[in-house]
Image (tube, rainbow, N blue to C red):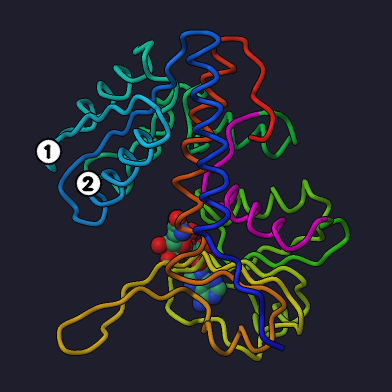
């Protein structure tokens, strides 16, 4: 079997188009310009690229994009002050703090300071709790995007066995919860899980969010399974070059799976598209407007 490749460009492109239409409609009907903010602390090159890409994508979709940049030496109090500025800015409907922050800035303190109504990364305890309660909130972008990719190839997920490898608050936990809310039978695996290959072989849907290159092998995959590779790992490609690979050994897995996402070109593209979507949803809710259909 050769798996169907679920292309992030296609799924994210469709979503971005819908977000753009929704943003334009909000502006035309209500004079509302959706605002997305990003706080970046320090000068980590990868974080700078992510932040730049988010700004570009926001502007392309017709959103107002704002940034607060703080130096690597910024104190926790300075970062929390920046969070409060975004919380209080009426032109900003959603914002995120690009993680990781430097060691003197506690991630938990930053997350706790974010207004849940503007928490487009879905990281606050309020939004995590709403997801667990299967109630309306803002859902973390990467798992939300991963679910859209799964739905591209599987219309009905009810009753399917799903295994999520990884239990981070950003990816693994909300991913498992989203799949449970779709009535999958979900197992969350992590570094202490016993006999991971055997567990994975039972999965109709396998999501890898580990951070270890080509960790999931082809003989771990159930024939016909849907495999979602969230991992982004930069590895040595020789001659002083590097390249990106996922957590799944792609060629091996694609020979067995029914559908699979590539890295690069997979879930990563969905994350930014879902961020824009969350900003539009947040803007609608803050203005007591219905969320446009198709989002
Ligand atoms: P994380 O916080 O480091 O979590 C990694 C998870 O993998 C942990 O739960 C860990 O288990 C588990 N793990 C580690 N080694 C394992 C092993 N040998 N067997 C089973 N589980 C193991 O990472 P994250 O933030 O969730 O990100 C995961 C990956 O996704 C990274 O490559 C990251 O770059 C990528 N990512 C991609 C996007 C995107 O847009 N595509 C967004 C976010 C993250 P323990 O909890 O037991 O330690």
- Name the residue rendered at 78%, 78% in the picture: 202
In this view, the residue in front, 52 or 89, is: 52
Cα gap from disc 2 to disc 1, whole angstroms: 10 Å
Residue 116 locus on image (x, y percent): 51, 24
Main secondary structure along the magenta-highlighted residues: helix
Is residue 169 left or right of 233 when viewed as pictured?
A: right
Image height check: is 124 above or below 32? below
Mark 2: C-beta under 8 Å from nearest atom of ligand 1: no
- The image quadrant where one finds the C terminus is top right
* Residue farthest toward the right in the current orientation of the protein: 159
Badge 2 marks a residue whose secondary structure is: loop
Is residue 140 inside the magenta stretch? yes
Q: Which residue is mark 1?
A: 71
Residue 273 locus on image (x, y percent): 49, 44
In this view, the residue in front, 81 or 153, is: 153
**Range shown magenta:** 137-155
> Is the residue marked by circle 1 packed among few (<14), some (14-19), or many (20+) residues within 10 Å?
few
What is the quadrant of residue 220 in the picture?
bottom right
- Name the residue rendered at 75%, 73% in the picture: 203
Is residue 259 left or right of 124 when viewed as pictured?
A: right
Residue 219 locus on image (x, y percent): 65, 91
Number of the label disc, if any, that sits on residue 102? 2
What is the quadrant of residue 96 in the picture?
top left
- Name the residue rendered at 63%, 29% in the picture: 137
> Is the residue marked by circle 2 packed among few (<14), some (14-19), or many (20+) residues within 10 Å?
some
- Look at the image and tell me whether residue 191 can be seen: no
The nearer-to-camera label among 2 and 1 is 1
- Name the residue rendered at 51%, 84% in the picture: 249
């Amino acid at each position: 079997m050769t798996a169907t490749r679920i292309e992030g460009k296609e799924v994210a492109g469709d979503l971005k188009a819908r977000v753009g239409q929704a943003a334009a409609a909000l502006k035309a009907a209500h004079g509302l310009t959706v605002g997305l903010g990003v706080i970046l602390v320090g000068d980590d090159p990868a974080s700078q690229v992510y932040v730049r890409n988010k700004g570009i994508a926001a502007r392309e979709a017709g959103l107002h994009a704002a940034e607060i940049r703080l130096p690597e030496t910024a104190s926790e109090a300075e970062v929390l002050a920046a969070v409060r500025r975004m919380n209080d800015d009426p032109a900003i409907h959603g914002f995120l703090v690009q993680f990781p922050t430097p060691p003197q800035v506690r991630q938990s303190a930053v997350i706790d300071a974010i207004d849940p109504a503007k928490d487009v990364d879905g990281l606050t305890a309020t939004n995590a709790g709403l997801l667990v309660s299967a109630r309306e909130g803002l859902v973390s972008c990467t798992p939300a995007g991963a679910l859209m990719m799964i739905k591209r190839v599987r219309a009905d997920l009810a009753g399917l066995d799903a295994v999520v490898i990884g239990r981070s608050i950003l990816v693994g936990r909300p991913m498992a919860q989203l799949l449970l809310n779709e009535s999958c039978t979900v197992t969350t695996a992590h570094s202490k899980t016993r006999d991971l290959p055997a567990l994975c072989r039972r999965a109709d849907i396998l999501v890898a969010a580990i951070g270890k290159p080509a960790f999931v092998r082809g003989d771990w995959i159930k024939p016909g399974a849907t495999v979602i590779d969230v991992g982004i790992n930069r590895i040595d490609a020789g001659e002083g070059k590097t390249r990106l690979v996922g957590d799944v050994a792609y060629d091996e897995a694609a020979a067995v799976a029914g559908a699979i996402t590539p890295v690069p070109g997979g879930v990563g593209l969905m994350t930014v598209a879902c961020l824009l979507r969350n900003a539009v949803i947040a803007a609608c809710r803050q203005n007591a407007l219905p969320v446009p259909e198709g989002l």
